[in-house]
Amino acid sequence: MESVYDVVIIGGGVVGCSQLFTLTRLGYRCLLLEKEAHLVSMASSGNSGMLHTGFDAPLGSIEHASILRCQQQILPVLNSLGLPYSKIGATMVAWNNQQKEKLPEVLQKAKDATIEDIVELSMSQLYQMEPHLALGATGALWIPTEAVIDPWLTPIAFAHHAKSLGAKVLTSTMAQSCELDGQGIWKISTTRGVFQGRVVINSAGLYGDVVDKLAGVQKFRIKPRMGQYLIYGSETQSLINSSILPIPTEKTKGVIVFKSVYDNVIIGPTQEETEQRTIPVRLSQGVVNSLLNHGKVTVPSLQSHPVVHTYSGTRPATETKDYHVVPHTDRKWLTLGGIRSTGLSSCLGVADMVVGIMKNKFCLEPSNSPSMHIPKIDISFTNHRTAMLGSEEYTVTHPLTYTAKFDRKVWAGL
């Protein structure tokens, strides 16, 4: 059995990796346990790569506060690490008068959320900005601070930097039981042995409720929600200049036509309730046809370009709309649950909240001195569908990164 870690993090998606990054820099001695063979393999391997501003997040929610906090710091962090991002902005488009009537409500909600730079566009302004957009729009809003990043490389770089500072990461390591001993130390029994920690952070995503149950603190249930996407080749990059958003509904942001940080145009996500927590391998033809039609009626020129890849993501939604950030103070167990489609947009904001909980709720001080400098990482992609970060090799698990760097064949299913 190893010595006692300050913090044991269960789950190696974007949320877990961002906790590892932030806490290790502050001097906490951290261990991250991931049950899959590679980091960023489950919910985080199927997100969009979009950095949302939080203009439509519920006011007063943990989600909204986390996104605002993350917005303040993530781009400087990406710059320091040498990671790609693009501030392409977003255009919310109404296609009928009923949708147009909702734009003032969206605009006011954004202002209430302290996002002041969203403006209403005239139709001439809209089509000047997006000349390939289908005709017939009735109204639009411009949201300039929306951005896109690499959804795989970002959390991988977070984990890599933490490892360079002494953090330990174990993959293929599934938590099987969690017991708090008489001295207040957690013993995490896994498929690779027993590990000890003063605090445990549950960031297990799609299995967050399962991991909470191991500690006897389950307060929520995961209700998986699937989103599916089409990816076009980078030759389509000139067809849109921003992310084209629909008018959101009470339940969903809707299907978006957007551009990845590598200039692939993408259509998605759908929103489908599912009982499966695994990631589907292939889209059904019905879903493909629906997404193709959305592209056709939004940006008609996409019809003349082939789809080069498809992918699905399963989000760890719950019975409530907000995140579950629950410190069990008497047990020093912290649940980070229900962090779904906006997890990438909020990750460093959630980490800030976690730091406050460590110090103010758990009264846990770091064992080591802080190391706040963030050096640029030397990054190169190999011929083996992996990436080298410094001297360490990581398997690419996200279809957006994979498609841009390795797989340029037209998808055979279309």
Image (spheres, rainbow, N blue to C red):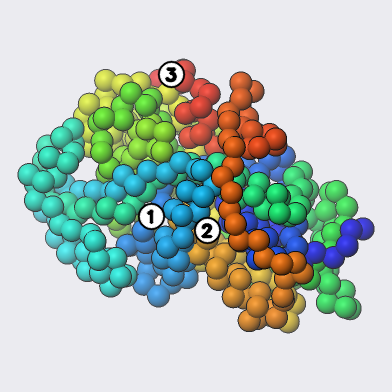
In the image, taking residue 65 as reference, residue 351 lies left or right, namely right
Please tell me which residue is depicted at 63% across the width and 37% down the height of the picture. Answer: 389
Label 2 crowd bin: few (<14), some (14–19), many (20+), radius 10 Å: many
Determine the secondary structure under disc 1. Answer: loop
Looking at the figure, which quarter contains the C terminus? top left
Q: Which residue is located at x 89 percent, y 58 percent?
A: 2
Q: Position of residue 194 (x, y in %)?
A: 87, 57
| Residue identifier under label 1 | 52
Mark with earlier residue (1, 3): 1
When the figure is inspected, residue 9 is found, relative to residue 390, above or below; the finding is below
State the mark number for residue 112. Answer: none
Viewer-nearest of discs 2 and 3: 2
Report x, y in % for residue 44: 55, 47
Gap between marks 1 and 3, in whole Å? 29 Å
Say what amino acid the circle numbered 3 marks: Val
The residue beneath circle 2 is 347
